Image (tube, grey):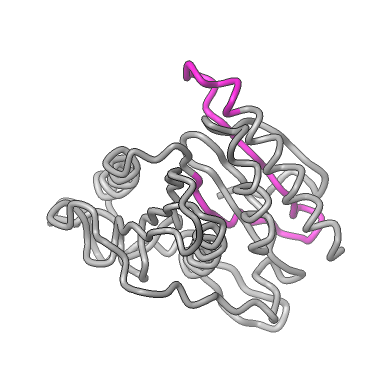
Amino acid sequence: MGPLGGPRHRTRRASPVARRLTSVRRLLAAAGVIVVAAGLVLVFVRGGPDGILPRAYVPRAYGAQGRPLAPNLFSPGACTSFAPTAADRHQIVFLDAGHGGPDPGGIGTTASGQTIHEADQALKVELDAMTLLRVAGFTVVVSRTGAGSVARLGPRDVANGLLTAQGVHDDVAARDQCANIARASVLVGIYFDAGPTPQNAGSVTGYDAARPFAGQNLKLAQLVQADVLTQLNAHR
C-alpha cells in the first residue's frame, strides 16, 4: 500500500445507520488505531511513533468462543459472530482485519529494527475494537480471529507460499460474503498503510459513493475521520 497523504486529514466516506452508530466511530478511534473501512467505511491510521501500535497496547481478551457463520464456506476461525456483553442494541457491525494467511500485507521495520506485518497489527486492532463494541451493546462479526486467511484457499489460490491473483480475489470476496451472511449494518476494514517517513503518516477515510445510502456512508466516514485524527493528534 502506498504512503499516506499527511497527518491532517483526507475524507472519503462511511455507512448506513450512521445516526445510531455514533458510539461505533468513537470506540473505533479509542482502539488506538489504524482503522480502514472496506466497502462502506475506510480508515487508515498510524498507530504509534514507529508506525505500529503503542507499546502500552494490549489486546483485550475477547471472551467466550464466538459463533462461526457458515463454517463450511470459510477458514477455521474466520467469519465469527460475537454477541454483545451489555444491553443488546440489535445492531450488527462487521470488522475486517486486513490480509492474513499467506498474505502478510505491508511489511515494515520499526526504528528499533523490529519487523512487523500489517496482518498481525490489523488483527490486534480488530479484536480490541470488537471487545469495545460488544461492551457497548453491539453484535460484532469479525472476518478472522487468528492469523489465517478468511477464504478456504484452494490450489489455484496459492503459489510459492503466496496468494495468487485469484487467491487475493477469493480472500477479499470472502470478507464481503461474510458481511452479507451476517446482515451487518456497517462494514469496517482495518489496515495499516505504509510510508517512508513519519511525515507521511496520517489518516485516510474512504466510503462507497455508489450506494443508495451514500449520504449515511459519508456521515459516518466524517465522524470516524474526525475522532481518529483527534486520538492521533493527542499523541503527537
Q: Describe residue 191's horizontal placement relative to residue 92 as left or right.
A: right
Q: Which residue of the protein is positioned furthest toward the top in this rendering?
A: 212
Magenta span = 188-217
Let me know if residue 150 is in the magenta part. Answer: no
Q: Which residue of the protein is positioned furthest toward the front in this rendering?
A: 87
Q: Quadrant of the C terminus?
A: bottom right
Q: Position of residue 66 (x, y in %)?
A: 31, 66
Q: Position of residue 160 (x, y in %)?
A: 25, 65
Q: Describe residue 228's horizontal placement relative to residue 143 as left or right.
A: right
Rendered image quadrant of residue 185:
top left
In the rendered image, the vertical position of residue 73 relative to residue 173, given as above or below: below
Q: Position of residue 84 (x, y in %)?
A: 44, 59
Q: Position of residue 85 (x, y in %)?
A: 46, 64
Q: Nearer the viewer, residue 184 or 235?
A: 184
Let me know if residue 193 is in the magenta part. Answer: yes
Q: Describe residue 224's horizontal placement relative to residue 234 as left or right.
A: left
Q: Nearer the viewer, residue 234 or 135?
A: 135
Residue in the image at 29% along x and 60% along y:
78
Q: Nearer the viewer, residue 57 or 203?
A: 57
Residue in the image at 72% along x and 77% along y:
111
User: Count the marks: how many?
Assistant: 0
Residue in the image at 69% along x and 47% along y:
4
